[in-house]
Every structure is written in structure tokens, then in C-alpha cells.
Image (cartoon, grey):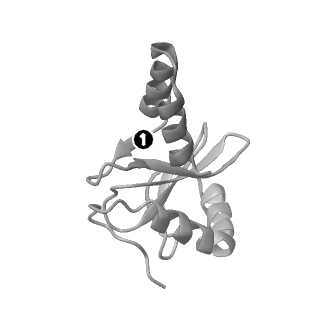
Amino acid sequence: MNPYEEIEQRARAAESLQDSAAVLSDLLSGGFSVWMDGSLYSIKQLVARVQGLQIHVYANEHSPPHFHVKSPDIEASFTIQDCAFMHGNIGGREKNLIQWWYERSRPQLVSAWNSTRPSDCPVGPISE
């Protein structure tokens, strides 16, 4: 069951206002939004989390397709096409490590990007 089906099931199964409010709390704090067709989508997808490091792709993003890397000391964005540094706060050593990781993880990033494209997003899927 995917996260959207799970939250839909929880909303339909709620037997009290408290249960329903818990679902709403999860929706509001969990980074969800609603597509034009009424279905849920995540405004960001956590691609990976390792010891405080988070890699995100966001739905309804601007061009070019990119991913975000965040940790207590890093907040930077890189293109999915070639891992070019876009902007942010990151050291040279960390950039090199992200480049190394990217060269081995690009297919997963493309898949995460493509799976988060809402129907009305100005930046569509990446075709290979």
C-alpha cells in the first residue's frame, strides 16, 4: 500500500473527530498537496536519509530538474541531468562526495523525480 492509499484508508476509517484530526495533522505536516484531479501528492519526496543527511526532490518545481541535499551543515541544490551545483551552502569535499554518489545513484534520482510530477507541473518527467 502506498502512502496515499494508506492515508486515504485512515481518513475513511476514522471513527471520531480525534481520529480525523490526526489524519489532517499528518496531511498538513507531511508535505502533502492535492492535484487538480483531487488526488493527493507529496510536495517533496525524501529520496534518502542517512544520519542527518536528507536528499529531496520536490513536486511543482522550477527548471531544470534538480535535487536538494540537506544536513545540519549543508543546504544545496544540484541538477539531475549532470549534478551541476546550482546554489547553496556546501564545501568542496562534500560537493565531490555528492558527485561520486550521484554517478552511482542517478537512475534512482530520475525515478524519484518522475514519480513526483503532478499533472499541472511546468517541469515534466525526465526522459532518457
Residue 126 at x, y percent in the picture: 43, 76
Closest to the observer, 3 or 93: 3
**Most extreme residue toward the right, as rendered?**
51
Number of disc labels: 1
The single residue placed furthest to the bottom in the displayed view is 128
The image quarter in which residue 24 lies: top left
Instruction: Give the residue drawn at x 66%, y 58%.
Output: 93
Using the rendered view, name the quadrant where residue 53 is placed: top right
Residue at the spot of label 1? 32
Residue 89 seen in render = no
Question: Toward the viewer: 31 or 6?
Answer: 6
Percent position of residue 107, x then y: 60, 74
Q: Left of 58 or right of it: where is 108?
A: right
- Vertical placement of 119 versus 16: above or below? below
Is 114 above or below relative to 71? below
Mark 1, residues whose alpha carbon is within 10 Å: few (<14), some, or many (≥20)? Answer: some
Against 55, residue 26 (above or below) is above
Q: What percent of the width, then of the height, locates residue 116?
A: 45, 59
* Residue appearing at x 47%, y 76% in the figure: 81
The answer to whether residue 61 is visible is yes
**Residue 93 appears left or right of 125:** right
Task: Report the residue at 53% width, 30% height from top.
Answer: 13
Q: Secondary structure at mark 1?
A: strand
66 to 48, vertically: above or below: below
Residue at (46, 68) in percent of width and height = 114
Q: Looking at the picture, which amino acid does disc 1 mark? A: Phe
Q: Position of residue 79 (x, y in %)?
A: 46, 67
